[in-house]
Amino acid sequence: MDTKDVIYELRTKNGLSQEELAEKVFVTRQAVSRWENGETVPNTETLKLLSKLFDVSINTLLGAPQKLVCQCCGMPLEDEIIGRNSDGSLNEEYCKWCYADGTYTYSDMDEMIDICIPHMTNAGFTEEQAREYMKNLLPTLNYWKKYEQLSDNGEFEAFKEQLIDEINALNIEGMPKVEKLNALVGSFVNLEYPLPSGEKVKFLNDSTTYLGNQLECEFGGDRCFGILANMDFILICTYEAEGNNPELVLYKKR
C-alpha cells in the first residue's frame, strides 16, 4: 500500500476530514490533499506527528518499505508489538518486551537467549538449534553491538533485584522463591478477576510492559502463581492453564 492510500485509510477510519487532520498535525488542508493524491509525502517531523496521532509506525505510514526486526531479540516487528519511548511515541528499533517506556529491559545476552528458546522450540526448532541460532544472531543486532553506549550501567537490573527482594519478603504461602523477572506485555497477562458482586475487573493496561513471572505452586495441583510488578505496584495471583479462573492473592502499592 502506498503512503497516499495509508493516510487516506487512517484518516477515514478515524472519522477525520482532511481539514481536521490538517489541524491536528499543523499543516494546511491542501497539504493533506496532496498527500492523498500522491503528489507529495509528509516530511519527517509531520510523519512523527502522524505516527503518534494514529498510533502506527512511520514504516507503516510509508507503506512498510522495511521489514522491521527488534534490535535486541531479533523478533519481526508489527505495529502492535513495537516498544515505546518515554513520551509514548513508537520506537521502531525494538519490541515491547525488550524496550518499554524508554527503558531497555534486558542486559544479559545469555538471559535473552534463555527467554527466546522456549518460543523457538514451540515453532519447531530443537533447543540446540535455537541456542546456536540466537548465539549467532544477537551479536549482529544494534542493541548488543552498542550495548556499552546504550546500557544504563546496571540501574534497571538493580531495580529488578529490588523488586525480587520485595516480592520474596511477602512470604506468600505455597509460592516458590522468585529468582528472576521477565518483561511481559499487559495485553498477554491482563486477566479479569471476579469481585464478590459478580463483576469482573482488570488491573493492568494492555499496552504497558510489566515485569513478571509464572511459578508452579509448591503444593502441587493445576494452579500456578502469576507475579506482575512495576515501579508502582506488586500483583500476585493464581490461575489455571491458559489463565483460566484467576484469583487475586495480593495487590500492593509500592
Image: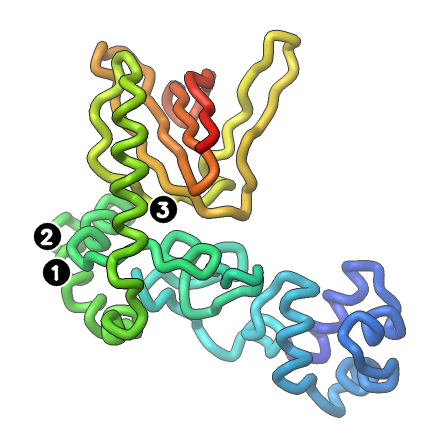
Mark 2 / mark 3, whichever is N-terminal: 2
Query: Is the C-beta separation of discs 1 and 2 under 8 Å?
Result: yes
Image spot of residue 233 (x, y percent): 45, 33
Nearest to the observer: residue 168 or residue 147: 168
Q: Which of marks 1 and 3 is in front?
A: 3
The residue lying furthest to the top in this view is 196
Question: Does residue 108 appear in the picture of this structure?
Answer: yes
Residue of label 1: 132
| Element marked by disc 1 | helix
Q: Is residue 164 left or right of residue 48?
A: left
Of residues 15 and 90, the one drawn nearer to the viewer in this rendering: 90
Q: How many other residues sit within 10 Å of disc 2, few (<14), some (14-19) or many (≥20)?
A: few
At x 31% / y 70%, what residue is drawn? 150
Q: In this view, does 112 lie above or below 28?
A: above
Mark 3 surroundings within 10 Å by alpha-carbon count, few (fewer than 14), some (14 through 19), many (20 or more): many
Please state, as top left, top right, bottom left or bottom right, where the N terminus lies in the image. bottom right
Tags 1 and 3 in contact by the CB under 8 Å rule? no
Q: In this view, does 24 lie to the left or right of 220?
A: right
Q: Name the residue under label 2.
A: 128
Residue 98, position in %: x, y? Answer: 36, 56
Separation of marks 2 and 3 at Cα, in angstroms: 24 Å
Amino acid type, residue under disc 2 in the picture: Glu
Where is 53 relative to 201, above or below? Answer: below
Which amino acid type corresponds to the residue marked 3 in the rendered image? Ala
Comes first in the chain, label 1 or label 3: 1
| Residue at screen point 57% across, 64% down | 89
Numbered badge on residue 183: 3
